[in-house]
Amino acid sequence: MNRISEITKRDILDLFHNGIEIDDFFETKKVTYLYFGRMEELEFLKRLYDLKSMPSLDSRFPDAESDIWQHTVNNDDYPFCWVFEDERFQLQNGTDETYLKFICEIFHPTVRFEKKYWKEFLAEVNRLLQNDGYELYPAEKISNRDVYGWRIFQPEENKMFIPYSQRNAKAIKEKKIALSIKRCARNQIYQLLQRYNDIYQETTETGWQYETSTSEEVFNDIRQFYTPKCYNDQKQYVETGSLQDFICYNSPYCVIDAIEFFEKYNRSNNFESQINEIMKLNDIALKLYNGKIVSTFDSQIKSSTLASIQEAGLKELIQEATKHYDEGNFKIAVEKLWDAFERLKTYYFPTLDKKKSINRIISDMSGNKDPYKELFEKEFFDLTAIGNNFRIRHHETIKIDIEDNRHYDYFYKRCLSLISVTIQYLDSGRML
């Protein structure tokens, strides 16, 4: 796919070539950041490219690695940021996937210089990429540091965050969701939230500065949906501004709301993992994921798995499917997922036709072991038959109607199961 315009690529090159301006207390200053971070330039490029198999532009040398060493180490006469315009690296005229993989590597924990301005450059790069429909995001962690992948940028239609109790109000009322949080777990949650209950300065539009805390901001957010209350000593349900009382003496769904809103203001990478440890310790089948509490039974495809997809069209369909599923639009979610399934089968096109592409995928998944090969061949065949026989992607009258949302749920989870495993076996090595 080629969505990223030459304008965006030029602007990103300018960032690394010329630096960016940032606010530093009462002044604005320009800061720079090397795209290869704390590494040597050649060392960085070897993480992504097999330089020994790439051609040299200098007739004196047999390959790109020797050529680049000569002109960046021995003589150092290549212009700054030369790689962005060198046709061998396909950053100017190659696919979006090639370009995005390169940009993600700039911000990898092994590469980036933690004490420099990588976060400011990441934010600016993201701002530019979003104009063309992509964004970088924390896909997984190494040593508790974010590893960034790329995905299709999906701007929120509704900027207001809807907390757990309100997103699931109907299911809670109909008792399709039943949740209990024991007192010991509530105390643990409160202690953790209190640890992240920061005090900081805010400034109004008129310039007036005031002191506030995370819990105060959380209560303000909750009041947009309901009045924060708790049970007092007389078993009366009364309004409260006490974080401890709200967590320890309230509906379990309100406790979940508080966790989500604390995550919204959280400035630490540890909050999510610590909350999830408490959930796991107390056998609560929920987890905090991407800012929302979700069921551990119904969690969607992992960010790290999504990050491994190197084809933008496939990634976009899977993202759309998971978004619609999370919003309860099961019919559209299943349709998008089956579109993704069909696109997945042609992953190696045009190098291979559809049938050979499927055979390669199954061969990689099975390790050429006959029992697994037969298993995955049958699963691909069965899902294809479901798509052909039921009214999922096509609208002919001869298709079998799906009238029960629970059947949509079954089709979705079965298809997602195969896709989420399959994409882990797709090409994920070097660019060249």
Image (cartoon, rainbow, N blue to C red):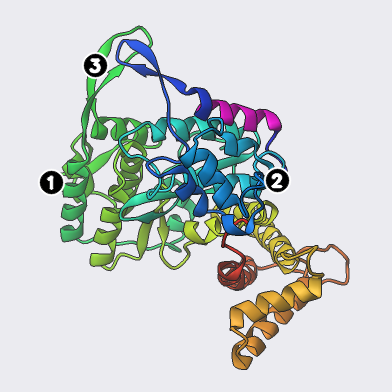
Single out the residue that lies furthest toward the right.
397
Q: Position of residue 262 (x, y in %)?
A: 31, 41
User: Which amino acid lies under the numbered mark 3 shown in the image of this protein?
Assistant: Tyr
* Residue pointed to by mark 2: 94
Give the residue at x 28% y 48%: 271
Q: Residues within 10 Å of mark 2 (few under 14, many from 20)?
A: some
Quadrant hosting residue 243:
top left
User: Which amino acid lies under the numbered mark 2 shown in the image of this protein?
Assistant: Gly
Looking at marks 3 and 1 on the same chain, the residue that comes earlier in the sequence is marked by: 3
**Does residue 346 belong to the magenta stretch?**
no
* Residue pointed to by mark 3: 210
Q: Please determine whether, in this image, residue 345 is positioned above or below residue 40.
A: below
Looking at marks 2 and 1 on the same chain, the residue that comes earlier in the sequence is marked by: 2
Label 3 – label 1 distance at C-alpha: 36 Å
Disc 3 element? strand
Question: Which marked residue is nearer to the observer: mark 3 or mark 1?
Answer: 3
Report the span colored magenta: 6-15
Disc 2 element? loop
Label 3 – label 2 distance at C-alpha: 50 Å
Question: Which marked residue is nearer to the observer: mark 3 or mark 2?
Answer: 2
Give the residue at x 48% y 59%: 304
Q: Residues within 10 Å of mark 3 (few under 14, many from 20)?
A: few
Please identify the quadrant where the C terminus is shown: bottom right
Asked whether, in this view, residue 389 is left or right of residue 30, the answer is: right
User: Which amino acid lies under the numbered mark 1 shown in the image of this protein?
Assistant: Gln
Q: Position of residue 107 (x, y in %)?
A: 44, 43
* Residue pointed to by mark 1: 234
